[in-house]
Amino acid sequence: MSGYEYISEQKIKVGENAAGEAIEVTKLVIKGGDSAAKKVYIQASMHASEIQGNAVILVLLKYFKNKQPLGDITIIPQCNPIGRDMLIGAGHQGRFDSTNGDNWNRYYFKPDINYHDFAKTHLKSDMKVYKQALREVLYQQIDQALANQYMLSRAKRLNYTMQKHALEADIILDLHTDTHSIDYLYSPAYAKNSAEKFGFEHVFLIENKCNGALDEAGFYPWWSLQRAFGELGRKEVVGVESFTLELGSEELINSQKAQMQALRILNYLAHHKVVQPYSDSSNALSSRVTFHNEDNFKALHALYGGLYEWFIAPGDVIKKDQLVGRCLKMSSQTAISISFPFNGLVISINAKGALQQGSHLLNVVL
């Protein structure tokens, strides 16, 4: 990073290994040229087997080295060094902590705030003032949670630490992938128009909740405050936008695809005036963006244990009773045809072929 006076690098401790040595992540900060511009936080690989986001980050860093952004941008690639080095054979454990089964992306901190009282206190404050006041509350509560050392699992410690570094951001982008999957986006419903600027063909709209993922932890306090302001008669926009970007299939790097995905992010950032207007992204943007209610996103599970062969691919539209695959049951030397009693869009397919009954098969939109 030397030679770029507006790019700095530091190490952040997120744990210790069994030798007592520090486990660290690398935090990159790209200083923007306009102090009034929005600030951005980007991380990749909290689910350690979901690695495509790191290829996207390399493309973005190359761009930022040549063109300083207007707003400050904080980037933490491979933000889960514990899961990164947790291998079973040739594959990542990835999604879960192998010691206790924790999902690495389900322990971000949910603050305990009386939003009505906070909004009442700041009913006449301008946005800059109340945003700083709310951030101070969030910092304080997360610091208190981190100080309660004996109650911290590895996932909680990691999530809380990453969340602290995202608190100053006006835009939070968490880069993930699915199993064998198309690209898609999770967006809070209030940011629907803004989400279009990413150019994803499929966008899932989320309501105001905080169930432990970073995108939800990012927008929940601000959306809750905006609603509280509304109840008191003050119309206000939500102060932070927070998204999960699903960038295809896990355990895979595709550099050509990363170029397109980075262009989508730059198009969104240009819309928010974080980077200079960007004119080279049109080929990367979908000509049609379809919005889905998150409740229509369904996970399907195996009726049978066996060896699965698929005749469909992510992105396919399936019809009711269509033959989509088969299950080979070696115990009975039989092959069972697989179909479903509904129409749907295939989002992702379990990349493993040998599955027990009840295993995850597909993600579909009904």
Image (cartoon, rainbow, N blue to C red):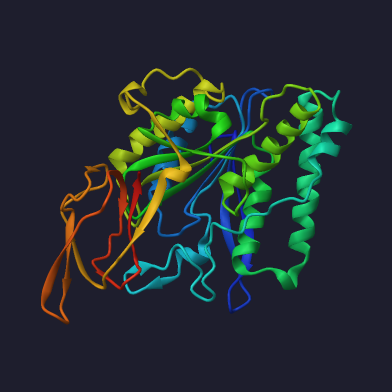
Question: Residue 73: which quarter of the image?
Answer: top right
Residue 243 position in % (x across, y down): 52, 39
Report the number of numbered marks: 0
Q: Is residue 50 left or right of residue 136?
A: left
Height in image: 8 above or below 350? above
Question: Residue 201: which quarter of the image?
Answer: top left
In front of the other: 268 or 84: 268
Q: Is residue 237 left or right of residue 44?
A: right
Residue 278 position in % (x across, y down): 44, 20
Q: Can residue 20 be seen here?
A: yes
What residue is drawn where x is 81% and y is 27%?
232
What residue is drawn where x is 29% and y is 44%?
344
Q: Can residue 269 be seen here?
A: no
| Residue furthest right as drawn | 121
Residue 111 position in % (x across, y down): 74, 50
What residue is drawn where x is 34% and y is 48%?
364
What residue is drawn where x is 36% and y is 21%?
280
In front of the other: 172 or 180: 180
Height in image: 163 above or below 128? below
Height in image: 182 above or below 171? below
Residue 109 position in % (x across, y down): 68, 54
Height in image: 162 above or below 87? above
User: On the rendered image, what quadrant is the C terminus found in?
Assistant: top left
